[in-house]
Image (cartoon, coloured by chain):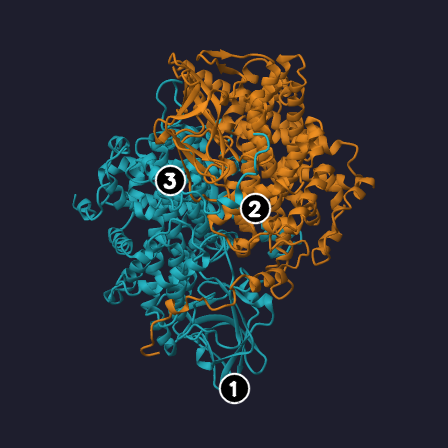
Chain colours: A cyan, B orange
Amino acid sequence: MVELKELSFIPDWPPGPLDTYRRQSSFDWRQLKLVLEDTNSIRLKYKVWKVLESEPLFAKSKITLSTDEQKKIAAQQMMKIAKLDIVPPEVFAMGYLPRYRFLMSVNEALHAICPSLSVKIALGVGLFQNALRAMGTEQHASFYNAAWSRQIVTCLAITEVAHGSNTKRIRTTATYNPENQEFIINTPDFEAAKCWVGNLGKTATTAIVFANLLTPDGQNHGLHGFLVPIRNPLNLQLYPGVLVGDMGEKIGLNAIDNGFAIFTQYRIPRQNLLNRTGGVTPEGEYVSVFSEPTKILGAALEGFSAGRLGIMQEATNTLAHSVVIAVRYAAMRKQFGPDKNGPEQSILNYQLHQWRIFPYVAAACVLKTSVYSLTDLYLKTVEKSEANSNGIDLLSQSVGEIHALVSASKPYYTWTARDAIQESREACGGHGYLKAANLGELRNNHDACLTYEGDNNVLGQQASNWLLRQWTDDVQSPLGTVNFIKRRDEILQSTFDQLIKRFDITSWQFINHCLEWLMCWLMNSIADDVRNQKQNGAGSFEAKNNTQVYKAKDLSIIYAEFYAISSFRLRCLKSDVAADVKPVLEIIHQIYGLWVIDRHMVPFYQGGFAIGATFAESIRSQLLRSCGGLHTEAVTIVDALAPPDYVLNSVIAKSDGLLYQNLQNEFMTNPGALERANWWREVLPFPKSKL
Amino acid sequence: MVELKELSFIPDWPPGPLDTYRRQSSFDWRQLKLVLEDTNSIRLKYKVWKVLESEPLFAKSKITLSTDEQKKIAAQQMMKIAKLDIVPPEVFAMGYLPRYRFLMSVNEALHAICPSLSVKIALGVGLFQNALRAMGTEQHASFYNAAWSRQIVTCLAITEVAHGSNTKRIRTTATYNPENQEFIINTPDFEAAKCWVGNLGKTATTAIVFANLLTPDGQNHGLHGFLVPIRNPLNLQLYPGVLVGDMGEKIGLNAIDNGFAIFTQYRIPRQNLLNRTGGVTPEGEYVSVFSEPTKILGAALEGFSAGRLGIMQEATNTLAHSVVIAVRYAAMRKQFGPDKNGPEQSILNYQLHQWRIFPYVAAACVLKTSVYSLTDLYLKTVEKSEANSNGIDLLSQSVGEIHALVSASKPYYTWTARDAIQESREACGGHGYLKAANLGELRNNHDACLTYEGDNNVLGQQASNWLLRQWTDDVQSPLGTVNFIKRRDEILQSTFDQLIKRFDITSWQFINHCLEWLMCWLMNSIADDVRNQKQNGAGSFEAKNNTQVYKAKDLSIIYAEFYAISSFRLRCLKSDVAADVKPVLEIIHQIYGLWVIDRHMVPFYQGGFAIGATFAESIRSQLLRSCGGLHTEAVTIVDALAPPDYVLNSVIAKSDGLLYQNLQNEFMTNPGALERANWWREVLPFPKSKL
């Protein structure tokens, strides 16, 4: 067991009442952890956590600080972390793929303890650098390094007050003036004010502002990025001509200083245009550049997808943390029992409770592996483009396929995490409502992921549009995610009754066939629908909009689910998977697969795949049986998903299982908990008259 | 239009861009408001809001205050409000029903602006008084009045750290000592500490503590209520022998000082036992009292249900507020359009957006009327018991039926509001994530309702258990909510194909028949399931637990939905409903009914009610058509649901429709928004080296 030794830097869980469950389980949690995560990544995350645990600036406050104080601390942390040698210089000597993996693991580790900080760094360093790579040229290299070394604090200003999803309607202008070779950035009115710009509110010194490039001939050349100085780095004073403010409190992520900006005829040098794809001559002529098309494609992909993959990795951790909390609490919490006077049973014993939580446990495992494999696809595709290989068509198709996968998956992952947090919160009852349980913080911080980097509902349409093109045109799937479409006729003819004769309901073949049928049926049905609407005079925009509900929206989700379960299965088949852990991986696969089918059951009936009670009853009773099979394994599975207690930060789910002792400590040590309120004089009861 | 004049105290909505929608609608919003709410209640709420709007102590803070500050203000508000003549003395001369309605309306008005305060008052006055009425005798009358006049601040201590839902396992003891005629209250260990007690953390002077009454002979007579002094009302110092603390921060409702208490051999006088159903003689003999059984039944009902009905009223308002925000925002927010260069369209135009929001708009209207009628049933039943009428059997059955209705409906209402808030938050995109949009506050405060006054999942089982008894034993439904069970054979034989020949899919008959079939099928299926399990050796506890998923849990929800739509229909049939508003009521009924069926579609197929595509397709395409029919009406419907802007408190949903102007004001006037952070020196970028 060489690999288990490799995880020996993780200390054993402390002994305690959870050991009863741990002893019942059939495998070692480390074996599962090695299936779900990469050893290097685990090691790195533990290193980051260890460094930060001993830094006072990163200590968690017991009480909610004012948002101003939160912003201050996050800004300090952002500077401090650059000095902590978390990303040593060697990293930059690594190849593209291991370097990116390294940075992504650091981001995951940071996000798990300081979500606002990780977003600040992602916006202020990672995405800024990506944008420079995608759109800038060598003349902007100094900004690239300056952002990394914190000589500037940066931000990306795209969204405007009145336009988010429809970026084509952005109205900020950058008008070139050949007289002094400057661009004049201007905000026509408040509706075009840049907003939701992370880091802008209080700290950014430099922004990349997206604006319409206008040449002196009055031509609008569309959106371009511009490097725009915002504050003097010596004193953080705003430069004249830009009105910048902090947007105020949000539901969560309040340590990020989201800002708005209004530019009034604000002048910047010509060189500040990010001119990779097009520039302006000193005289004011617009010049397109179309060199190195594969690099540009790769860069575009990077721009699109890196942020979304980061969100998916974070959402997967959020999902994992919420089920760790729910399972450990349910194992320790006893309520009711078969005999009124006998012992009570753990709420983990109840079928309803298992059905509420275990599918999310399975989803956490599945999504851990699938986000890893999707990231791999992504990084390798970008790497290929960097290598400037030939084969632009194939690369272009791969980019399209990855973009569709990410556009389907980012909504799916973030919604799944949203639902898991809420179910866990409710499953932990009143104690789950304590701030110290951490579920509220998880929810409020996670909530933004449903909207940023592409609104979930809008993004999903990009995936379903791509899928529809695969259906109606030729299948172009170099990554193979929709090759099944080539078997469409055979798939659409299959039925539950046939399938169940060939395959066990718990088999991957059964689950895969069901999902393939479902996607084919939906694509077919949407294509018919669009055709009919158009024949009846509807425009393409209207026809597409009117196939979202029940159809295209679901299709994109199922595509994400299908990719997720397929990559989980491939992971489980690898030779490094320990034999002991295979049975539990099997149950996880079953639960996840049957749960997915259960949640999309209506179209199976609607499309004639199933008739009568058997299909629903078999799926559902098997799902419940499989959940029952996880009862003695769940605590060990969440041990594999759990970070150290300090990171999980939940008083009701510590790894020692000492639920009530931990609550007691918490209650007794809350600041001021036991003191008389110092405002007691102001709230005294009225004097007695008769009492 | 006498009635519309009656609403003339509500000012017209200010003119603005929403008028485009308002002019398109087919009815006057006041006509709808009169269907959804009682005029007296509306008038009273507006009065409360007017009084509090001008009280500085009730002004909303723009920034989140520390929880200590929040607690102080709520405690001050609780004292202040007693002086504001919001409940004038005449109210106590009213009959039971109008008096209770009055107090409930005041609670709704308070909850809409200060949810923590309304809970504090409900716990500290209303529920305390209810508990005294239910359990106390004349010797406790002075406490009753003292709570009302704020000479004492009270709380109810039931839940313990290790026991919430299973109250039978509460372990606090009250041991009678005849020597000094005292009870000794004792907490055996931290797991039996009272917790989650609202008002206890910092302010309560008196608690009703639920403890096991032990007589000197060692007998345990079960749970009884005891009046227990906690703090000296003169200085809020804790009395010796009780360790009380504040539980710390929660997800929401942080102005409530939830506390825990540990009693150490704490002595209280014999008279402090609430001895309505049983007392202890000075010598220590336990004496049961069984007089006036109907009154006790009524009191028991009051104890059970009043708090839950209050929560349902509050949840309905929360639901209403969230859809007001979502609809007004969607009407004003434009994004994309059929022509890339042409005008953009309101997001309210998109079918997907309508389908996400309009069912919740319909639900808000339906639940407004149904919580009103359920409250009516409840109050009249309690009133009957107060009148000490005969007919104990009938009353006992009514109490059972109301308890089932409330137990099914409290989970259903609160879950529906939960989902509506979340969908609205996402539907408002990034701007919905602003604290000033108010959806985050609604969500975090509402979240507790899913757990308190009966965990939703546990409570639902009480309803399904009652329904199952109706199915397997004789139907005993004096209120008529399950009389359809008597037609079970006929109902279970019906199919979609037959029904759709007799009734239009939008008709109430069609919708009702579908829901009746669904409930009968579920009850039948559960009864079979339980029988089979028992035949295979399962105990009753296990058999019931294993019929929750897909079955009993859904049954209880559908029962609540069925009652809701039935009472909405009865309301719409009344003679006071204006002719102009009838068509829109019809669409609301359709949307709600079809949406409910859509969400429970699988069992219709599973049970053979439907086969093939037609059922699902008809329901779904009609639901989408009906949603489309609400497009021009939705703004006016939410005008009928909306409170004044000050109460709604959402910058993105003011009644003037000036979305971006209001956002501009908000951004510019947030405290410190435009200033340089006063911690700028601590976060300066590192000095340039090369840049």
Sooner in the amino-acid sequence: mark 3 or mark 2: 2
Residue at mark 2: chain? A
Dot 3 falls on a residue whose secondary structure is helix
Q: Which residue is mark 2?
A: A549
B170 with respect to B348 (left or right): left
Host chain of mark 1 = A
- Among all residues in the image, which is located at the extreme right? B1
Q: In this figure, which residue is indicated by the disc labeled 3?
A: A667
- How crowded pointer 2 is (Cα within 10 Å; few <14, some 14-19, many 20+) is rated as some
Residue under the point 48% across and 76% down? A239
User: Label 1 amino acid?
Assistant: Pro
Report which quarter residue A658 is drawn in.
Answer: top left
Q: Amino acid at mark 2?
A: Val
**Residue B240 in the image: x percent, y percent?**
40, 33
Cα distance in 3D space between marks 3 and 1: 67 Å
Q: CA distance from mark 2 to mark 1?
A: 51 Å
Q: Please check whether the numbered discs 3 and 2 fall on a single chain.
A: yes
Q: Does the residue at mark 2 contact the one at mark 1 (Cβ under 8 Å)?
A: no
